[in-house]
Image (cartoon, grey):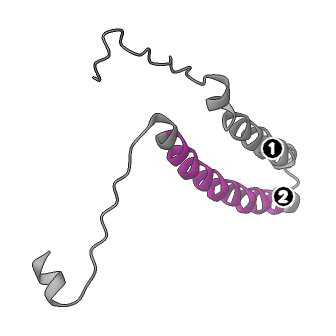
Amino acid sequence: MPRSLAKGRAVDLHQEEFSELGTFRGTMASLGCGLVLLALLVLVAATLVAGIAAEFNWELGKSITGAWPAVILAVLSTFLALQFLPLLIEKKVPATKPREDGEDS
């Protein structure tokens, strides 16, 4: 740190409090990015398989590639529903009672 000060660089320290809600939000943000990337991968793969199925008249491939929008919708809908999970299991913090003897703890 003295070297940073000598060179005129600022050092930012963040005093963050870690909580279960913050961890949940961070996890869901990462998972959401992963799901979007996975959906794009499924889109490209389904388009490729659909083209191959159309070229070779492959009925199973056509039915599989026809189902990808419903699968993506189901996965993203489930993920969206999970966003409301903290509201459903919100912890009730009991109010602290003042001590009778008048001392602060």
Q: Secondary structure at mark 2?
A: helix
Which quadrant would the N terminus be assigned to in this image? bottom left
* Secondary structure category for the residue under label 1: helix
The label number, if any, that marks residue 21 in the structure image = none
The residue at 82%/57% (across/down) is 50
Q: Which residue is mark 1?
A: 73
User: Image quarter for residue 101?
Assistant: top left
Q: Predominant secondary structure in magenta? A: helix
User: Residue 69: x, y in percent?
Assistant: 83, 48
Question: Which numbered disc covers residue 56?
Answer: 2
Q: Is residue 8 above or below residue 50?
A: below
Residue 72 placed where, x, y %?
A: 76, 46
**Relative to the observer, which residue lies in front, 55 or 27?**
27
User: Front-most of 66 and 78?
Assistant: 78
Question: Disc 2 to disc 1, how far (Cα)?
Answer: 28 Å
Q: Position of residue 94 (x, y in %)?
A: 50, 16
Q: Amino acid at mark 1?
A: Leu
In the rendered image, residue 78, in percent from the top left (x then y), is placed at 72, 35
Give the magenta-colored segment's residue range. 24-52
Identify residue type, mark 2. Answer: Phe
